[in-house]
Amino acid sequence: MDGNLTCPLPPATEERIQMAHGGGGRLTRQLIDGIFRPAFSNPALDAQHDGALLEINGARLAFTTDSFVVRPLIFPGGNIGDLAVNGTVNDLAMCGARPLYLSAGFILEEGFPFETLRAVVASMRDAAREAGVTLVTGDTKVVDKCKGDGVFINTAGIGVIEFPHSIAPAAVQPGDAVIVSGDLGSHGIAILSVREGLEFEVPIQSDTAPLWQPVEALLRAGIEVHCLRDLTRGGLAAALNEIATARRVSVRIQESAISVEESVKGACEILGLDPLYVANEGRFVAFVPEHDAVRTLAELSRFPLCRRAARIGRVESGSPGLVMVQSSIGGNRVLDLLSGEQLPRIC
């Protein structure tokens, strides 16, 4: 086949997926609710969690998968390899599961440098060791030059649920405190700085990191964690909207309580970005009962990556799916899903 041939275009009236739209936006919800869920509907999938919660012969397991297409492959603070490990490990942690095993599938573009591949694989190895997981199976495919953008990675993970109560959107209750584990926006801005050739006075690095340790600390402390969600594509805004919609509650947060590093805040202002929508790879939001809010913050403060954890709001009844932000000057605005993503190819 001639590699220069272009794909025939569908009729102009046919709906098509646009490349500019990534995860975390309205299009993703349309794809999930309009195509995938109707085709594959089952209790595990319909829970709309970061992974499937399964019970096999009395063992409670979590199973998840994710694909990584970040551009550029190497960025300040990490690369596509450790991002792929941490992203899947964190999805398991959000289910309250201890991450155990991973698979990895590599789609490599013809001509991709072996030296770069070795660096990516080495970072995956190191990230897996840090997270306490073992990569036990995998697959490799090679596609034509100019058809794969270097390397894409798919990872799947299995973890074991060791604590009794269920952590899922369905467990969220009106009155719950909403707690964010740290400052926002570093990953997305780190990616953008390389992608667009931007230089900031204070270098910004990705926050990519495994999250099981702080999650385990909350569970071992006996905190009644209702729901967890890592703040990846679409950032905090997408996570809150997804959970509010799934549980049919509303969420009200205070903008002044949300931590954003000054360098990230300045970069967002220059670039016209809202840090509440910018992706993170080492941050999560926790929904806990009001009486556990102070203990949750105390437990999280023990970990360097959670040193700026904060209570940012609460869950309310009524207005299902609505997320409201109170600004520092007292005004209110709706924090809605964007029609697309501010920064595509971010993970």
Image (spheres, rainbow, N blue to C red):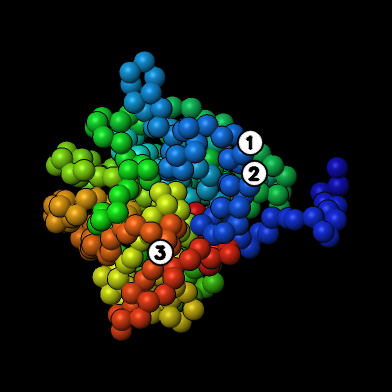
Q: Residues within 10 Å of mark 3 (few under 14, many from 20)?
A: many
Q: Position of residue 160 (x, y in %)?
A: 32, 29
Q: Which residue is mark 2?
A: 35
Look at label 1 and name its amino acid: Ala
What secondary structure is found at the residue carrying circle 2? helix
Left/right of residue 233 with respect to residue 285 in the rendered view: right
User: How far apart in space, not on screen, are marks 1 and 3 (Cα)?
Assistant: 29 Å
In depth, the one of 287 and 160 nearer the eye is 287
Q: Nearer the viewer, mark 2 or mark 3?
A: 3
Residue at (50, 63) in percent of width and height: 337
Q: Which residue is mark 1?
A: 39
Say which element carries label 1.
helix
For the point 38% across and 59% down, which residue is it?
A: 318
Query: Regarding mark 3 in the picture, which secondary structure is present there?
Result: strand
Q: Amino acid at mark 2?
A: Ile
Image coords of residue 232 (percent x, y): 43, 55
Q: Which residue is mark 3?
A: 323
Considering the image in quadrants, where does the N terminus appear?
top right
Q: Are marks 2 and 3 in contact (CB under 8 Å)?
A: no
Amino acid type at image mark 3:
Val
Above or below — where is 193 with respect to 43? below
Q: Are marks 1 and 3 in contact (CB under 8 Å)?
A: no
Q: Are marks 1 and 2 in contact (CB under 8 Å)?
A: yes
Q: Residue at x 19, y 54 (%)?
A: 290
